[in-house]
Image (spheres, grey):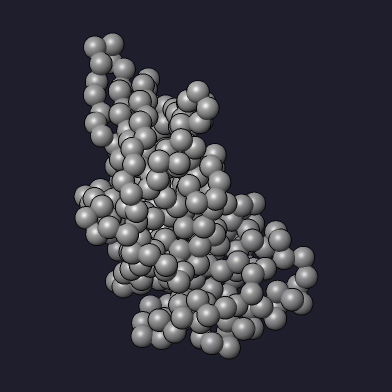
Amino acid sequence: MPKSGFVSIIGKPNVGKSTFLNAVLNEKIAITSSKPQTTRYRLEGIYHSDQGQIIFVDTPGIHEPKHPLGEKLVQIAKKSFADMDGILYMVNAVEPFDDVDASIIESFKALKTPVILVMNKLDLAHDLDRLEAHIAKYKARYDFHKVVAISAKDKIYTDQLIEDVFDLLDEGILYYPEAMKTTRSKRFLMAELIREKILNLTQQEVPHSVFVEIERIDRAEDNLLEVYANIVVEKKSQKGIIIGKGGALIKKIGRQARLELKPLLGEKLFLDLHVKVIPDWRFKTATLNQVFAGDFE
């Protein structure tokens, strides 16, 4: 009888949660960048093997929010604590323990769910004595089910972590067909891939001030898929940055996005990008409701 269950990946921004998910699925379903708070939505990634099925739930990084958008991201992440068969608490193996870590650990104390402490970025931890001292700070705060060290980027010990996760699960039904890697729609993945290119091609305040909405998807007579998307920013100056001199940057964003979207969709693609300004949208309840509506909840 196969095993199956839901396992949430929890942690601060930029600890490698999405990198880990992509690595174990051998397929990119979660966007990644060096920018903090890249992940904005709950994203289910489905791992299949002869042992059964693990539904990993990738979550936004938990941080001290400075605006309503940040509060929403933390709320989404903390909702993913509930009704799980296991939790992976992922931390950076070379970053110091801080108040946010302490707050996350405190929230575990009200749960009965087993929590595995995952020290990621082992490839950067060259001093093993220092790593052991780092781990000890976490273990002093909470009785973790297990403590493991991995490198999601280099896929070091990720297979062993999968075995540890299966040890948490009970025998049960398989929730999804084997070909399915995520519960998210192609519309969702399109918007996120476009946003990833913006994150990686812009600097400073621009990445955090952007969301992408798919306005419409049409089918042309020659079977070409036509995707029309809006890149929404908070300031006119940000609109100018994203468009770039002579439209150079928005063309580059579109070109890079198309390269990844074509194999994802399995068909020819026309991508039309426009930029619009909604001043201070991160602080407006109505706009935030739009950003997190429907498939983007």
Q: Where is residue 45? Give x, y as percent.
A: 39, 52
Residue shown at 40%/41% (left/top)?
236
Residue beneath the point at 64% across and 51% down: 154
Residue at 57%, 78% in the rendered image: 98
Image quadrant containing the N terminus: bottom left
Pick the front one: 122 or 75: 75
User: On the rendered structure, is 92 left or right of 61?
Assistant: right
Horizontal and vertical percent position of residue 280: 34, 53
The answer to whether residue 165 of the structure is visible from this angle is: no
| Above or below: residue 11 compared with residue 252 | below
Q: Give the camera-side residue of 120 and 180.
A: 120
Considering only vertical position in the picture, is 218 above or below 213? above
Residue 96 lies in what quarter of the image?
bottom right
Q: Position of residue 157 (x, y in %)?
A: 62, 60
Query: Which quarter of the image is occupied by the C terminus?
Result: bottom left
Q: Residue at 67% x, 63% y: name it.
A: 122
Q: Quadrant of residue 173?
A: bottom left
Q: Looking at the picture, tell me which residue is in the foreground, 170 or 135.
A: 135
Q: Which residue reaches farthest front?
A: 236
Where residue 256 sits: x, y (%)?
50, 30
Residue 233 visible in the snapshot: yes
Residue farthest along the bottom direction in this orientation = 140
Left or right of 86: which side holds 201?
right
Q: How many marks?
A: 0
Is residue 126 found left or right of 118 in the rendered image? right
